[in-house]
Image (cartoon, grey):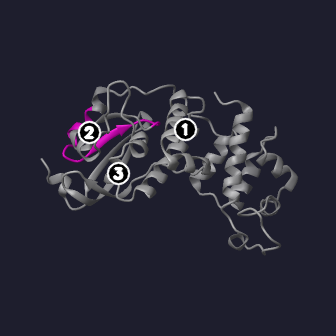
Amino acid sequence: MPTPSDQRRQLGDFLRSRRERLTPDEVGLPRTGRRRTPGLRREELALLAGISATWYTYLEQGRQIRASEQVLAALATALRLDRYEREHLLQLAGHARAAQTAGRELLTAEAAAVPLLLQPNPAYIIDGAYDVLSHNRATAELFPNLVTGADRPANFVRWVFLEPAAREVLVDWDDEARGLLARFRAQAERHPGEPRFAALVDELTEGSPQARAWWPQYDVQARHSGRKRLRHPQRGAADYTYTAFHLADQPDLTLVVYCDSTGGAAAAS
């Protein structure tokens, strides 16, 4: 379980990462003097948020102080955080309840059967840590080596960063991998202290230079539907739409369904 000091350090790191991505021009401040570090100065952000520069510095340094929701809202506005980054900020500051799950969630037989019914469209169910709890044959064909052994569950984050085939399947690998890591971070922060999240982070940062470089940037996203350019091992590259559905009685579990926009997946046997 993260200690209070660990939580404060993560909050400070997140605030600093968001401060450094803004420029004075973006927030309507004049440029004054030579800047040795990227982004806004602490004093400038404090001015925009209407708080003491010293107090903000203590917050970013991980000192033992607690920010109110009103102050956090002001900082979120000044930092131009989106909805999901705001939620992440509240979570780190202790103003949002963490998910009350421990370990992998159990999947009912009825839910596990859904991906099989959606064949020939690739479909799978993942939990909060991106462990694949159920999938159909079309998923295994589209994402080679997703399942590597019985000793550990298939995991999409591990597959994207550590499986060489992922760079062939994901045509826009960099963008897709960065987005996935941001969504995984959002999930990990909802489960503080859960060992399997920490173990997967260690595995990713040890085995992938990109994960090692991107993880400290504190990007967060929510799970969503969208489009991807994927290269099927047999049928070649195509545009896919994908839709994510949360299970009604287990909101941490997500059903994801892919459809080849050209009709290739639906036409396959």
Residue drawn at (48%, 40%) of the image:
207
Nearest to the eye among marks 3 and 1: give it.
Answer: 1
Q: Mark 2 points at which residue?
A: 115
Quarter of image, res 141: top left
Could you tell me the amino acid type at mark 1?
Answer: Ala
Residue 182 lies, in percent from the top left, at 52, 49
For the residue pair 144 and 48, the one nearer the viewer reads as 144
Which residue is label 1 attached to? 188
Residue 121 magenta: yes
**Quick check: 187 above or below 37?**
above
Camera-near label (2 vs 1) is 1
> Which residue in the rendered view is the most extreme toward the left?
269
CA gap, disc 3 to disc 2? 13 Å
Q: Distance between the residues labelled 2 and 1?
A: 25 Å
Q: How crowded is mark 1: few (under 14 residues within 10 Å), some or many (20 or more)?
A: many
Q: Start and end of the magenta stretch?
A: 113-129
Give the crowd class for mark 2: few <14, some 14-19, many >=20 residues within 10 Å: many
Q: Image height check: is 239 above or below 202?
A: below
Label whose residue precedes the other's in the sequence (3 or 2) = 2
Look at label 2 and name its amino acid.
Pro
The image quadrant that residue 74 belongs to is bottom right
Q: Which of 175 and 226 is in front in this view?
A: 175
Is tag 3's residue or tag 1's residue first in the polypeptide sequence? 1
Q: Which mark is residue 243?
A: 3
Whether tag 3 and tag 1 are in contact, CB under 8 A, the answer is no
